[in-house]
């Protein structure tokens, strides 16, 4: 149980740090966001989310839901 708490604390610290970086480092100056910039940031955040999911799956030795056969 103690290990799980540190994982949650680490996850929340990481999320808050990424939010702070996004708000205070990358977007200091107000400007009109172009479609290309929005698409780029969307890809960056989606890639981070996928990497996080892959890390969770790898650390917990989980089997992806799509690879299991349906229960009949």
Image (spheres, rainbow, N blue to C red):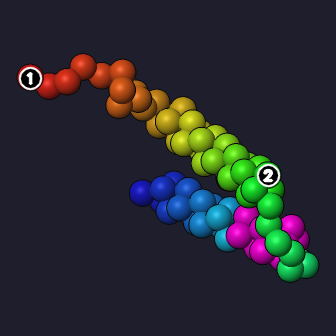
Image quarter where the N terminus lies is: bottom left
Report the residue at 54% width, 32% height from top.
Answer: 58
- The answer to which of 37 and 15 lies nearer the viewer is 37
Q: Is residue 17 visible?
A: no
- The answer to which of 41 and 71 lies nearer the viewer is 41
- The answer to which of 7 and 56 lies nearer the viewer is 56
Q: Is residue 29 left or right of residue 55?
A: right
Please tell me whether residue 21 is drawn above or below residue 42 in the rendered image. Answer: below
SS for tag 2?
helix
Please state the horizontal and vertical placement of residue 49, each as a whole percent of the image: 60, 48
Please tell me whether residue 54 is drawn above or below residue 27 in the rendered image. Answer: above
Please state the horizontal and vertical placement of residue 23, each as a whole percent of the image: 78, 74
Q: Which residue is mark 2?
A: 36
Please state the horizontal and vertical placement of residue 37, each as a whole percent of the image: 80, 56
CA gap between label 1 and label 2 equals 46 Å
Q: Residue 24's image quarter?
A: bottom right
- Give the residues drawn in magenta, as a range: 18-27
Q: Is residue 62 left or right of residue 17?
A: left
Q: Which residue is mark 1?
A: 72
Report the residue at 73% width, 64% height from top.
Answer: 18
Q: Earlier in the sequence, mark 1 or mark 2?
A: 2
């Amino acid at each position: 149980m103690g290990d799980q708490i540190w994982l949650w604390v680490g996850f929340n610290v990481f999320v808050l740090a990424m939010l702070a970086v996004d708000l205070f480092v990358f977007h200091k100056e107000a400007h009109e966001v172009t479609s290309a910039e929005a698409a780029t940031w969307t890809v960056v955040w989606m890639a981070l989310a996928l990497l996080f999911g892959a890390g969770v799956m790898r650390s917990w030795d989980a089997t992806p839901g799509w690879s299991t056969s349906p229960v009949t």
